[in-house]
Image: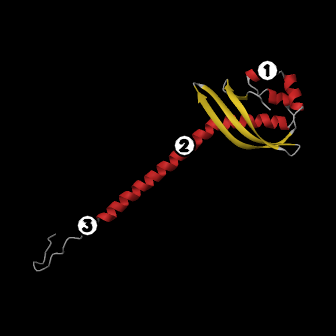
Amino acid sequence: MITVTNPFEVPQPPRPQRPWKTILIVLGVVLVLCCGGAIFGGYRLFKGVQGATEPARTAAETFVTDLEHGDVDAAYGLLCKATKAKYTLETFRDGVSKQPKISSHAFGGVNVMNYNGKVSATVVLVLTFDTSFTERHTFPLVKEDDQWLVCGQPY
C-alpha cells in the first residue's frame, strides 16, 4: 500500500509532553506500595507481640478462673516450682480460704521480658471480690518447661 501525503499539508506541531502525569502516576504507585508495606508490617508486629504475650495472659487468667470457681487444686497446679517449694497445697488452700472470694476479673495488661535468656512476665488483672471491692493485682509469671506458671506471692 502506498501512502500519499499532501505536500501542502501543514505539519502538526508535536504534542507537548506532560511530565506531571507520569510523575503523579509514579508517586501514586510508590504511595500504594509504602502504605501496603506499612499495613503488612504493622500486622506482622501485632501478631508477633500477641504471640509472645497471649500465652502468659491465658495462664494468669486460667489461674484466676480456677480460684473464682473454687478449684484451688487446679490453681495450685499452675504455680511455679519455687512457689510450690514455699507453699504446700494445704498451705495454699488455707491462704486462699482466708482471702475474699474472687467473683470476676478483667484483663489489665501484660508485659513479657527476656533477660539473659530467662523469660518472665507480669500480668495485671482487675479482680472483683464478693465484697464488691476491686483491686488491680499483678501476677508474676515465669516460663518453665515451655509453660507459663504463676510465681511469687500468687494471691
Q: Which mark is residue 16?
A: none
**Which residue shows up at 43% across the image and 55% down it?**
31
**Placement of 102 over or under 15, stated as above or below:** above
Q: Examine the rendered structure and indicate whether residue 105 appears above or below residue 88.
A: below
Q: Which residue is mark 3?
A: 17
Q: Amino acid at mark 1?
A: Lys
Quadrant of image for the N terminus: bottom left
Disc 2: which residue: 44
Count neighbours of disc 2 (C-alpha within 10 A) and say few if under 14, some if 14 to 19, many if 20 or more. Answer: few
Query: Which corner quadrant holds the C terminus?
Result: top right
Is residue 147 visible in the rendered image? The answer is: no
Kindly identify the amino acid type of the residue bearing the numbered disc 2.
Arg
Residue 47 location, x and y as percent? 59, 42
Q: Amino acid at mark 3?
A: Gln
Q: Nearer the viewer, residue 137 or 68?
A: 137
Q: Is tag 1's residue or tag 3's residue first in the polypeptide sequence?
A: 3
Mark 1 → mark 2, Cα distance in angstroms: 41 Å
| 47 left or right of 95 in image | left
Q: Residue at x 40, y 54 (%)?
A: 30
